[in-house]
Image: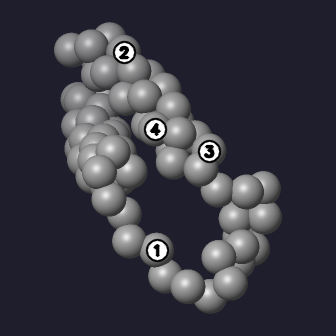
Amino acid sequence: MQVALQIASIVVSIVLIILILLQVKGGALGSLLGGDVGGGLARTRRGLEKTLFQITIGLSIAFLAISLLSVVAFQQ
């Protein structure tokens, strides 16, 4: 079980990194570092961008759950 949790953690983290990088790809380098490139205008996510955002949230929750499960499994 411990090996399965480790593999799942690695796979989820790699996919999570890829999804985060895909979201930042649309912005400029300044927005990657926290700068405000949009001139103060709020953007709404639509279409694929919204779907990527929601998948990222789901995978981050899954990563947290896997991490908590692995801590419990390694204590025994």
Q: Name the residue under label 3.
A: 25
Residue 16 at x, y = what percent?
44, 37
Give the Cα distance between marks 3 and 1. 15 Å
Residue type at mark 4: give it. Leu
Instruction: Give the label, 4 or 3, closer to the camera.
Output: 3
Residue 56 at x, y = what percent?
35, 46
Q: Mark 2 points at which residue?
A: 7
Q: In this view, does 43 lie to the left or right of 39?
A: left
Whichever of callouts 2 and 3 sits on the residue coming sooner in the sequence is 2
Q: What element carries label 4?
A: helix
Whichever of callouts 1 and 2 sits on the residue coming sooner in the sequence is 2
Residue 66 seen anywhere in this rendered image of the structure: yes
Quarter of the image for the C terminus: give it. top left
Q: Mark 1 points at which residue?
A: 43
Q: Mark 4 points at which residue?
A: 19
Residue type at mark 2: give it. Ile
Whichever of callouts 3 and 1 sits on the residue coming sooner in the sequence is 3
Residue 39 at x, y = what percent?
68, 84
Give the Cα distance between marks 4 and 3. 10 Å
| Quarter holding residue 75 | top left
Q: Residues within 10 Å of mark 4 (few under 14, many from 20)?
A: some
Whichever of callouts 4 and 3 sits on the residue coming sooner in the sequence is 4
Give the Cα distance between marks 2 and 3. 27 Å
Q: What element carries label 3?
A: loop
Give the Cα distance between marks 4 and 2. 18 Å
Q: How crowded is mark 2: few (under 14 residues within 10 Å), some or many (20 or more)?
A: few
Residue type at mark 1: give it. Arg
